[in-house]
Image (tube, helix red, strand yellow):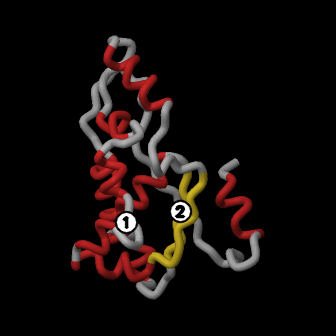
Amino acid sequence: MFWPKDWLPTEPGFEHARVHSYGYNSDWTTKKESHLSIHDFGQALLADLYNSPCLRKAPETPIVLIIHSIGGLVAKKAYLLAHDDTLYEMVARHIQSIYFLGTPHRGSALARVVKFLCQKGAYRAKVFVDELVPGSRSLDVCSPPQPGS
């Protein structure tokens, strides 16, 4: 069962929604090293949205992102990148709302544990794990400026 496809159309306002999913490799337990960052995943998501045949056929289609965990950081990065690049103006204009579910906006203390395991050789280094450590520069860059800052 793919819960978004099964449950979302039963919610008021989502009856006619087309549900799409997006995936990327954030498996930190693989033995393979990864240099991919949240920025890289965000760029890939943005490019996929831009090239979506569904959006090309119906460019007025509103986009609602419902994301979970690190996917929230990826989607937030894609949204910020869309606003910084005129090529993706159409995507930025059509993102109507973003629902964050369990997104570590300020990082996760568990990221330090995973980073430690990677450093000890239990797993290979992953850039996106380093970015999840609270206080990392990547988390600051993924956050829009706060009022008064």
Q: Mark 2 falls on what kind of element?
A: loop
What is the distance, in whole Å, between disc 1 and disc 2 at their CAs? Answer: 26 Å
Q: Is residue 23 left or right of residue 37?
A: right
Q: Is residue 6 left or right of residue 112?
A: right
Q: Nearer the viewer, residue 149 or 36?
A: 149
Q: Position of residue 7 (x, y in %)?
A: 73, 61
Quarter of the image for residue 133 reads: top left
Residue found at the very far front of the displayed protein: 148
Q: Position of residue 97 (x, y in %)?
A: 53, 73
Quarter of the image for residue 27 reads: top left
Characterize the local packing of mark 2: few (<14), some (14-19) or many (20 or more) Cα atoms within 10 angstroms.
few
What residue is shown at x 46% (from left), y 48% (from top)? 106
What residue is shown at x 40% (from left), y 17% (from top)? 117
Characterize the local packing of mark 1: few (<14), some (14-19) or many (20 or more) Cα atoms within 10 angstroms.
few
Q: Is residue 115 above or below residue 106?
A: above
Q: Which residue is mark 2?
A: 20
What residue is shown at x 37% (from left), y 25% (from top)? 115
Q: Amino acid at mark 1?
A: Pro
Q: Position of residue 103 (x, y in %)?
A: 53, 50
Q: Amino acid at mark 2?
A: His
Residue found at the very far bottom of the displayed protein: 60
Q: Position of residue 6 (x, y in %)?
A: 72, 59
Q: Is residue 55 left or right of residue 141?
A: right
Q: Earlier in the sequence, mark 1 or mark 2?
A: 2
Instruction: State the mark number for residue 144.
Output: 1
Q: Quadrant of the C terminus?
A: bottom left
Q: Nearer the viewer, mark 1 or mark 2?
A: 1
Q: Mark 1 falls on what kind of element?
A: loop
Q: Is residue 67 above or below residue 14?
A: above
Q: Nearer the viewer, residue 140 or 125?
A: 140
What residue is shown at x 35% (from left), y 20% (from top)? 118
